[in-house]
Amino acid sequence: MSTRVWDYLPEYERERQDLLDAVESVFASGQLILGESVRSFENEYASYHGVAHCTGVDNGTNAVSLALEALGVGRGDEVITVSNTAAPTVVAIDSVGAVPVFVDVHPDTYLMDTSQVAAAITPRTKALLPVHLYGQCVEMEPLRRLARTHGLRLLEDCAQAHGARHHGRLAGTMGDAGAFSFYPTKVLGAYGDGGAVITSDDDVDKALRRLRYYGMEDVYYVVRTPGHNSRLDEVQAEILRRKLRRFSSYLECRRAVADRYAEGLRDLTGPDGLTLPTIAPGNDHVYYVYVVRHPRRDEILEKLKRYGIELNISYPWPVHTMSGFAHLGYGEGSLPVTEALAREIFSLPMYPSLPKDTQDKVISALHEVLATS
Ligand SMILES: *Cc1c(COP(=O)(O)O)cnc(C)c1O
């Protein structure tokens, strides 16, 4: 059997009874939509973050787009973000009619280069959308300052950064709102789709609850401003509640896997060798993915195929080079760091229950392959 880059089955085996009990408890509750489990999960997730509100939604993409809408971002507004992200970040901006504006990423962390943001602000800029990619946070203070000075909204895409901290503060608590995905692979993953938005702004939360529920507010059946149907499913919410109780142990396991990689691969690093993840000052990394870099990436991946190890690239095509976003006018060469990364990065298997011997297999395979590359 090949080694998968992500696998939930070992974890499912371990947690099976609790997870099946979660499903049973919802089925037996008599309330299948927006019931006790969604309400409780929202309260528990808000309280974990020390914020006033959490609204459960159907997935991470809609968490971003509903949050943008709730923050007043709409047609023709510009939203500054990065191209080195999962495409849904940008799809969400597009779906509210706003225009994505890209800045490049920092060559060490691969996260938004905040020094480029000021120059990207125009009279049409409405929001900043940093992405806490791979499991560590973007440098937030410069963005908070720019948002204050220019009257911009600040939304954090936290789909890869549940539990990540920046100078002690949790991802999602440093701007106007934080959008999360609970897609199964994520640091807090459901057994299906799910998402949430956290905020301490009462009006933003009120808008989110209206937007996820057709646009209905206090009176059922009455829509003043049309919304969407983006509810978090009751079964997924109950599963997420159970997993939230074990959340700190998932983070510990991910960090242990990362430490073992760092230890085992250190001797392969160097200017013409492997580059391991760089943790920015003040960051606690949660390692959603373990991204390494090598100038001869494709050759290495080709050779690694023989070892039956599945590897992933996050992401092989920068969003600005995709045909669906060609109309934005960013050609090849417009975001050089992002484009170089797309050619050189790859991700090693990473999940909390990754067995040690499997990990050692990855480490030794990399040693063998790099000895001849
Ligand atoms: C996964 C992801 C999303 C989208 O989440 P879905 O639940 O799959 O819709 C958005 N942004 C980033 C950065 C992601 O990694």
Image (cartoon, grey):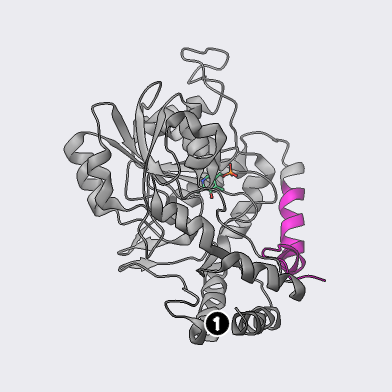
279, above or below 358, in the image: above
* Magenta segment main secondary structure: helix
Q: Which of 169 and 114 is in front in this view?
A: 114
Residue drawn 25% across the image and 52% down it: 115
Question: Which residue in the structure is indicated by mark 1?
Answer: 260
In the rendered image, is residue 162 in sight? no
- Identified by mark 1, the residue type is Arg
Q: Is residue 194 visible?
A: yes
For this view, does 282 lie left or right of residue 349? left
Q: Which residue is found at the position 61% from the left and 34% from the top?
A: 34
Q: Which of 198 and 53 is in front in this view?
A: 198
Q: What element carries label 1?
A: helix
Q: Quadrant of residue 204?
A: top left
View extreme (left): residue: 149
Quarter of the rendering occupied by the C terminus? bottom right
| Residue 208 x, y percent position in the rendering | 46, 31
Left or right: 360 as drawn, with respect to 245: right
The magenta segment: 1-25
Rendered image quadrant of residue 167: bottom left
Picture residue at 22% right of the left edge, 33% below the top: 151
